Amino acid sequence: METCVKPCWDATDVWLWKLAKAHVLAHDSGYHQLVSHWLRTHCVTEPYIIATNRQLSKMHPIQRLLCPHLRYTMEINGLARLALINSGGIIESAFSTLKYSMELSSDAYAKQWRFDHEALPADLISRGMGVEDPSAPNGIKLAIEDYPFANDALILWDAIKQWATTYVNHYYPQANLVESDVELQAWWTEIRTVGHGDKKDEPWWPQLKTQEDLIGIVSTIMWVASGHHSAVNFGQYDYAGYFPNRPTIARTKMPDEDPTAEEWQAFIDNPENVLLNSFPTRAQATKVMAILDVLSTHSPDEEYIGTNIEAAWEADPVINAAFQEFNGRLKELEGIVDSRNLDPNLSNRSGAGLVPYQLLKPFSDPGVTGKGVPYSISI
């Protein structure tokens, strides 16, 4: 008996696979936009901003540390509620989740979101993409060694955490100073019990008693607002602006799902037409392409992470030196990303037909560039 060395697919199987892929991508587009992007960056950051403005004075060192990471987000979220995630808005009219879009986002928050998993190392571990390993670079052994996002992001995370560590230890040289800081404790209490009040009794919330506790909390907030948001946002137009590559909705069912005789024959006669009919309409595609272009665009006055040192930091020799070191590490990351994209051994980011992975290169020119990490969620 002969066996197939290659998959024994006929033309029907190939077209069914293409249609199935379009359906999967459409659902993944909705999850990406509503959970990975909106929920895990824009949405959950609002309580940090509100508590910081309410509880920390303008002179407070943690207010000054976080301020660059919390600018413009409330404004851009307000605009999103007017035209993007509103009832009948762009998401509900052009994504597969339709009128259930906010319900999906809310359910994901209720069942999946936890603050202690938002720090990059914990996020990778919780998704099964890495395990703790003190002997590995950055303390994480990746499940997939050639994982462009994780490899670049871990360097950025380490730079952010080192900057936060020096900063926090400078202003809080003893642990008791953290626990006795009335403003700081009120800030963290509001984030947990008011801003994220429906999760206030969860056991996973970090305590805020030591410098290490504070470093972990502020590093997480800084990472989400900068690196995490940049990774899920600024490549959207490059990847999804061409709709066959990333449809946002599948308008027809799979042709093998209880088809009528006429439906099945139409698929057999012209499968390409069936695939094209499953893609978004021209109106849907045009609408989403326009918004993805806006979301992926850096403004000419973008504030990139590690630039524009605050006046209070510059006046303090210790903080000034730490900030210059932070800026230097980010410049090093630029070169590391470039070298990785030229490494033929990294087949997930270098090779024929592959777009270089540079979403976490810290700096960028204006426009749609597919790189650049602003301080804050500003678009």
Image (cartoon, rainbow, N blue to C red):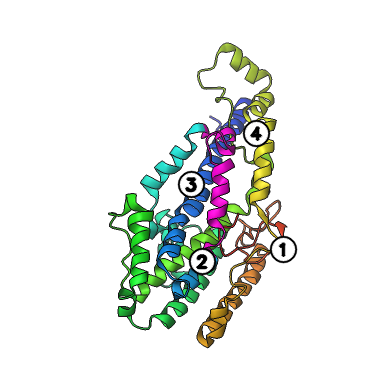
Q: Which residue is mark 1?
A: 365
Segment tinted magenta in the rendering: 69-98
Whether residue 150 appears in this view of the structure is: no
Q: Earlier in the sequence, mark 2 or mark 3?
A: 3
Q: Position of residue 206 (x, y in %)?
A: 33, 64
The answer to whether 283 is drawn above or below residue 142 in the figure is above
Mark 3 / mark 4, whichever is N-terminal: 3
Q: Nearer the viewer, mark 2 or mark 3?
A: 3
Residue 154's label in the rendered image is 2
Q: CA–CA distance between discs 1 and 4?
A: 30 Å
CA–CA distance in space, label 3 to label 1: 28 Å
What's the amino acid at mark 2?
Leu
Residue behind mark 3: 35
Residue furthest top as drawn: 261
Nearer to the camera, 283 or 158: 283
Contact between marks 3 and 4 (CB within 8 A): the answer is no
Residue that appears at 40% across and 55% down: 126
Query: Tag 3: Cα neighbours inside 10 Å, few (<14), some, or many (≥20)?
Result: many
User: Could you say whether the residue bearing mark 2 is in a helix, strand or loop?
Assistant: helix
The x, y position of residue 298, in whole percent, is 67, 58
Decide whether residue 343 is among the magenta residues.
Answer: no
Residue visible at 58% across and 47% down in the picture = 79
Q: Mark 4 — residue?
A: 284
Q: CA distance from mark 1 to mark 2?
A: 23 Å
Q: Comparing marks 2 and 4, which lies closer to the viewer?
A: 4
Closer to the camera in the image, 192 or 312: 312
Q: Image check: 126 left or right of 228?
A: left
Lateral position of residue 175 relative to residue 362, left or right: left
Task: Report the front residue among 162 and 39.
Answer: 39
**Considering only order in the chain, which callout, 4 or 2, is on the residue closer to the N terminus?**
2
Q: Amino acid at mark 1?
A: Asp
